[in-house]
Amino acid sequence: MNCQGSYVTYTIVRGDTLNKIAARHDTTPVAILHDNPGLDPRNLRIGQVLSICIAYDTMAVSGSHRTGISPEYVMLQNRQRTLWEQHVMYTRMVIMTIADSLSDDAEVTKRILQNPQDFANLYRKYYGDNVARHIAELWTEHLVIAKEMFQSLKKGKSEAAAEAEKRWYENARDIAEYYSTFNPFYNRDMLEKMMFAHLDIVKKEFDARLAKRYTDDIAAYDEGERQALGMADFFSQGIAKQKSSMFS
């Protein structure tokens, strides 16, 4: 059973049942059990963390019943995936630079801050300059806050790190909210869950790197890459559904 979407994490709380959790995430108990080997549906433990697939429509163009995919859509998907690959890769480089006290901070920071503008340029074609500008601002804020949090964690400044982390998640909510305003196929709640999953994985990656748990560090990066590619496809499909005439 392959996840046609993006994985998020969910922590079990009092009163949860497998059916309730499945309904809340628009999935099935069978799918949750498949993705969480060893999970006992009759004995859910409060605080237990589940991995849940948030599915999205695999039809590239809304309303289309054709089986072919247009060259325009292939180009969009490839570009979106490339940008998300670069996002997680250069985020990793920032993590390594800060955690390992490397001397390439200026160069790595300059390169990763190009990523928001690259995202903006992709969206400019479909939504114009105003949307592109706002996207660049939101993703720049996302990266600046993340670096601030990493630096505070490195220096052992727990209060500053916690404050930055709070702003980081607020920014993720802002990204989800804004994307939902210009594309009805970008469901705000689903996108917020994806964004939170992305942040959770990045923080897990940094924590492992800082603690020199390199096996966990690499595993977190691999997890983040898979999740980011799912987000990339979600974003591409949303554009293709809304702007279907451009992909015929």
Image (cartoon, rainbow, N blue to C red):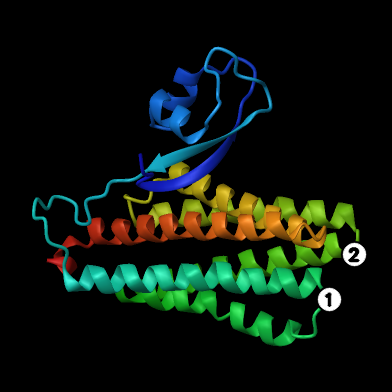
User: The C terminus lies in which quarter of the figure?
Assistant: bottom left
User: The N terminus lies in which quarter of the figure?
Assistant: top left
Q: Residues within 10 Å of mark 1 (few under 14, many from 20)?
A: few
Q: Residue furthest right?
A: 156
- Residue 240 in the image, given as x and y percentages of width and height: 25, 61
Q: Residues within 10 Å of mark 2 (few under 14, many from 20)?
A: few
Nearer to the camera, 103 or 161? 103
Which residue type carries mark 2?
Lys
Nearer to the camera, 247 or 226? 226
Q: Are marks 1 and 2 in contact (CB under 8 Å)?
A: no
Q: Residue furthest left?
A: 66
Q: Secondary structure at mark 2?
A: loop
The answer to whether one can see residue 170 in this image is: no
- Residue 141 in the image, given as x and y percentages of width and height: 63, 67
For marks 1 and 2, the one nearer the N-term is 1
- Residue 235 in the image, given as x and y percentages of width and height: 37, 59
Residue at 41%, 61% in the rendered image: 232
- Left or right: 186 with respect to 196? left
Residue at 90%, 64% in the rendered image: 155
Q: Which mark is residue 154?
A: none
- Residue 209 in the image, given as x and y percentages of width and height: 76, 62
The answer to whether one can see residue 2 in this image is: yes
**Residue marked by disc 1:** 101
How far separated are the C-alphas under marks 1 and 2?
11 Å
**Residue marked by disc 2:** 155
Q: Quadrant of residue 221?
A: bottom right
Nearer to the camera, 130 or 78? 78
- Left or right: 5 with respect to 93? left
Residue at 75%, 82% in the rendered image: 105
Nearer to the camera, 106 or 124? 106
